[in-house]
Amino acid sequence: MTDPKGEALTALALEILDTLVVIATPGWAELSVAIERRDAKPVAHSIVAREKEPREARAELGLDLGEVRASLDAALDELDELLGRGALASLAVHRASDVDATVALLASDGRLLAEVPLDERLYPYRVYTEALFDAALAAATIDEGQRALSAEAQGHDDWEYDAKTLELQLKKGVLPWRVYRAQVIATWAKESETLLWGWANDELPERSKSLSNAARESTKSHAGLGALRRPHLPADEPFASALARMAAARVGAWAVYPAVYESGVIYLGVLRER
């Protein structure tokens, strides 16, 4: 028989761990979060991390740290309601590795309210992991092509993409000017601030999805990239752009063209003709 409260605790602990990976210094082994009350609601007051080994600053993912902190506080509020209003005073996280962590929820007298293990079975469900940031750093392999595409495309007025022929046309005025072969990596919707991977987009022909499919398949041999396996996920534009670039770099695209339109962006993985 399943335990609804236990499942809810696990889901919230996963969300909290994800936010702390973004906020805290890379390489931490233990972390404590002190909580204060504002209008009777719990808010993370201080976050103190102890590093296992010093690491360089991580690659940028275009994340808004204010939004990440807000997500942390929202998860703490849900935890507080689940445990009994006013019970939660702090939490401590022990991380043996990026894959294996334990979240301890504590009362004001230090009493353990609950302990939530988050092991390798739950790793695929996480979004923000050290592995994701490492993959973002590795995406620098696409930089040379990206610079070259920007230089070649400078001065164009408009774009047109045919998902059946896989042809991206850059235009000057109404006339075609540059033509590239390209596939849809992902799309980003402005109103909902949601990223939808190309492989999950039912409106696209299959032949325009092979790059995005390959990016998803590549995560089977590289754990911790759950963000590339979810059909869609909340993302503001800088984060969506970073994820699309990362996915394109993993499958050997030459560059990414952000095809901006009124409702959002189509991220096209450009294939350089050899």
Image: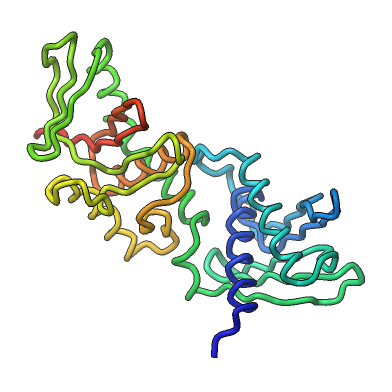
Q: Is residue 214 above or below residue 274?
A: below
Q: Which image quarter: residue 218?
A: bottom left
Query: In the shown orientation, is residue 176 left or right of residue 39?
Result: left
Image location (x, y in percent) of residue 175:
11, 12
Q: Which image quarter: residue 86?
A: bottom right
Image location (x, y in percent) of residue 107:
85, 70
Image location (x, y in percent) of residue 60:
51, 39
Image quarter hosting the N terminus = bottom right
Residue positioned 12% across, 37% down in the render: 166
Image location (x, y in percent) of residue 19:
61, 53
Tally the marks. Answer: 0
Residue positioned 54% across, 40% down in the render: 63
Query: In the shown orientation, is residue 264 left or right of residue 74?
Result: left
Residue furthest toward the bottom?
1
In the image, 239 versus 49, the foreground residue is: 239
Q: Which image quarter: residue 225?
A: bottom left
Residue positioned 44% across, 36% down in the render: 191
Residue positioned 33% across, 47% down in the render: 247
Residue furthest toward the right?
109
